[in-house]
Image (cartoon, rainbow, N blue to C red):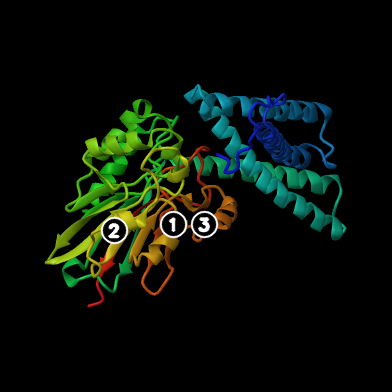
Amino acid sequence: MALDDQSTETVGQESADPPAEPAARETAGARRRWIGGLVFLTVLGLLFFLPWWVLLASGTGWPSPVVVSGSVLFGATLLAFPVAMVLGHGHRQLDWAARTGDTILGVIWVLFAWSAIGGVLRLALAAAGAGGREAARGVALGVAVIAVVLLVWGYAEAMRLPRVRRTEVTLPRLGPGLDGTRVVVLADTHYGPIDRARWSARVADAVNALDPDIVCHAGDIADGSIARRREQVAPLGTVRPRLARVYVTGNHEYIGEAQGWLDHMARLGWESLHNRHLIVERGGDRLILAGVDDRTAASSGLAGHRADVHAALAGAAPDLPVLLVAHQPKQVAQAVAAGVDLQVSGHTHGGQIWPFNFLVRLDQPVVQGLSRHSGRTQLYTSRGAGYWGPPFRIFAPSEISLLILRSPV
């Protein structure tokens, strides 16, 4: 960050010491990195420690071979996890490492969540006078069985063809000629280190089977470069709506090739709504279909990338209804200010793995479904078609969203 105040020196006087500001900034940066590293290690240690404690220690009294072998497994996984994440999601982008690290993250999160519940149950049993080794073993076995069942089920949910979720949305300004317009929303396909090219083809077929008028991809199309994910993305080129198919960037595009993805989707025949709009018409009535960049675009360093609703609607007739595609639900504040009728978003994954939905709610105004945010503006938040990172969906099923637009008359 540039500084507004610059130090000056007397003409002819040499400075023996380097400027203080750069040194101070470097010290502050080092301090932030140190604190961030400490927080990361603390969270990581807690994620692994609590399941180890509930499953193997805390009065369970398992035989020594069980405790030792289980502890070695926890320790080895704890050491392998950050290495796999760095190799998979860092500069080298090794898919096998990403698959390993992501899977470990999902497994340990589920174990942590249910170990916490098990710990509370242990306290309740102790307060009721039913503590002891048998209670500890019963809780440990219960946590282990629940975790295994949920992980198997969650993996199947992540890999399955998303269910179609049908919602009718009444827009007071929608003309009768557009009544019944079928809008399909795809979001968060997250094509990544697990090859899902055949899954992608099935999703495209399912979208076409819905006989859509408009198809919107609300961002987070893939994790990784275009070259690596090209085959998985290719089936999107077979989607055939009657009026329009549009795409906006999500926050994950800004980790890599945001402009490249906009260009690639355009080559596949999609309209990339990079802070712009188009107009669709049916039965003599018109609808503005607008899109904005993700809210993280401004900090990406890419020239011309930022979320700008006003630019997206520049030149649009103020009396026409507006459907805005914006990746994150929290972008609805700008939609309300601009008088948008309906915003469609993704990003949240519905929480993806319970109870992460409660943490998502701290950051976003809505986790999933249809919500109202002003007298005019409604928001539909998709749980997404794919998944990010851990290949699990637990109590947050994937979806292909079918919105039926209704006029009031």
Q: Nearer the viewer, residue 238 or 247?
A: 247
Q: Are marks 2 and 1 in contact (CB under 8 Å)?
A: no
Q: Amino acid at mark 2?
A: Leu
Tell me how far mark 2 sits from mark 3, CA to CA.
24 Å
Q: Amino acid at mark 1?
A: Gln
Q: Earlier in the sequence, mark 2 or mark 3?
A: 2
> Nearer the viewer's eye, disc 1 or disc 3?
1
Q: Amino acid at mark 3?
A: Gln
- On screen, residue 56 versus residue 391, left or right, reads right
Residue named by callout 2: 313
> Nearer the viewer's eye, disc 2 or disc 3?
2
Residue named by callout 3: 364
Residue extending farthest front: 12
Residue that appears at 80% across and 58% down: 124
Residue that appears at 23% across and 35% down: 267
Picture coordinates of residue 211, whole percent (x, y): 21, 53
Picture coordinates of residue 351, whole percent (x, y): 52, 51
Q: Earlier in the sequence, mark 2 or mark 1?
A: 2
- On screen, residue 168 versus residue 76, left or right, reads left
Q: Which mark is residue 331?
A: 1
